[in-house]
Image (cartoon, helix red, strand yellow):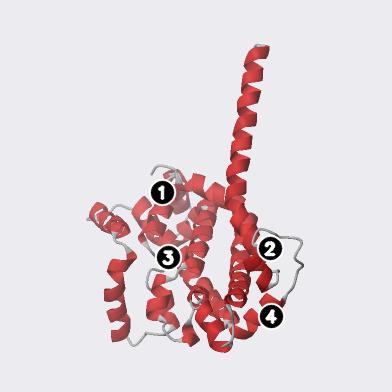
Amino acid sequence: MTASTRHHRRAALTGSHLFLATVTLGFLAPVVWALVSAFKQPAAIIQQPLDLFSSGFTLANYQRMFEDVPIGHGFLNTAIVLVTKGTITLLGAPLAAFGFAKYRFPGQNLLFGAVLVTLMLPMIVLIIPLLLEMKALNWVNTYQALILPGSVDAFAIFWMRQVIAAVPDELLDAGRIDGCGEFGLFWRIVLPAIRPGLAGLGVLTIMNIYNDFVWPVVVASSSRMATLQVVLSTLAQNISGHRISADYATVTGELLAASSVALVPLLVLFIGLQKHFINGILAGSVKG
């Protein structure tokens, strides 16, 4: 390799790093602005929006926000839905995918095709039928309505099928020879082998449930059952309702405080589990 070639490659690598750094800063700038501005005086947020560090820091926005907005209750409802629905997804989807990936039965392709067709149905199309079903079951404004619909969805089944299809059939045959039952094959052989893909699905599931808004706002209309995203959507009304004299600056400060509180868990989750997420993406890309 000549010196000129090395120079060009080094220049290209430096240019790509600069480009990626610029794009990263562009994406992070609004997040950093929101997090920092939440600690500013409300008037300074409006009058000096780009002055992040010289206007002084205060916890008043957070204190007022916790007084005016039931964000703690929203976190509690979201946590209950997240743990329960996430557990059902991470148990049910791999089991269904195991059947599609490693067994042959009449109508298998037709059934799997029907599952995939549901991926093309937007949520807005399903809202009215699902809501009527929840009403018939008397589940409106209950945890059952927030948790059960979509707990094992087509994407999760498809994702895990792709991962499980890469597990060698010889391992399952060896387990059967050793006297392992079918569920034992899944629990002792398949499940340990698909941990990267399962971790990736877990991260996506947590993010989807945490950010879900359309279905909770339809089926959980009472404040008692409101999830975090529903609470965030009604922040301005809650703040104005508790503070009749609240001006635009006060509402904006509390909005930024609440958004920061809701944003931090996702940031911590993604930063802490990014390795598992990337490994899961690669595992899920295996062709079955």
Q: Quadrant of residue 272?
A: bottom right
Picture coordinates of residue 140 (x, y %)?
A: 37, 85
Inter-mark Cα distance, 4 to 2: 16 Å
Residue at 37%, 72% in the rendered image: 149
Classify 10 Å Cα crowding around label 3: few (below 14), some (14-19), many (20 and above). Answer: some
Instruction: Give the residue number, with chain letter if any, for mark 1.
Output: 162
Residue at 69%, 80% in the rendered image: 63
Element type where label 1 sits in the image: helix
Picture coordinates of residue 74 (x, y %)?
A: 54, 79
**18 relative to 90, above or below:** above
Is 170 left, or right, of 137 in this rendering? Answer: right
Viewer-closest of 236 and 108:
236
Instruction: Give the residue number, with chain letter if any, for mark 3.
Output: 92
Quarter that holds the C terminus: top left
Quarter that holds the N terminus: top right
**Residue 258 appears in view:** yes
Q: Earlier in the sequence, mark 2 or mark 1?
A: 2
From the image, state whether disc 2 or disc 3 is nearer to you: 2
Q: Amino acid at mark 1?
A: Gln
Is 135 left, or right, of 21 in this rendering? Answer: left
Instruction: Give the residue number, with chain letter if any, for mark 2.
Output: 36
Question: Of the numbered discs in the image, which one, if any, rests on residue 136?
Answer: none
Residue at 55%, 47% in the rendered image: 279
Q: Say if mark 2 contacts mark 3, CB within 8 Å.
A: no
Inter-mark Cα distance, 2 to 1: 42 Å
Instruction: Give the residue number, with chain letter if any, for mark 4.
Output: 63
Inter-mark Cα distance, 2 to 3: 41 Å
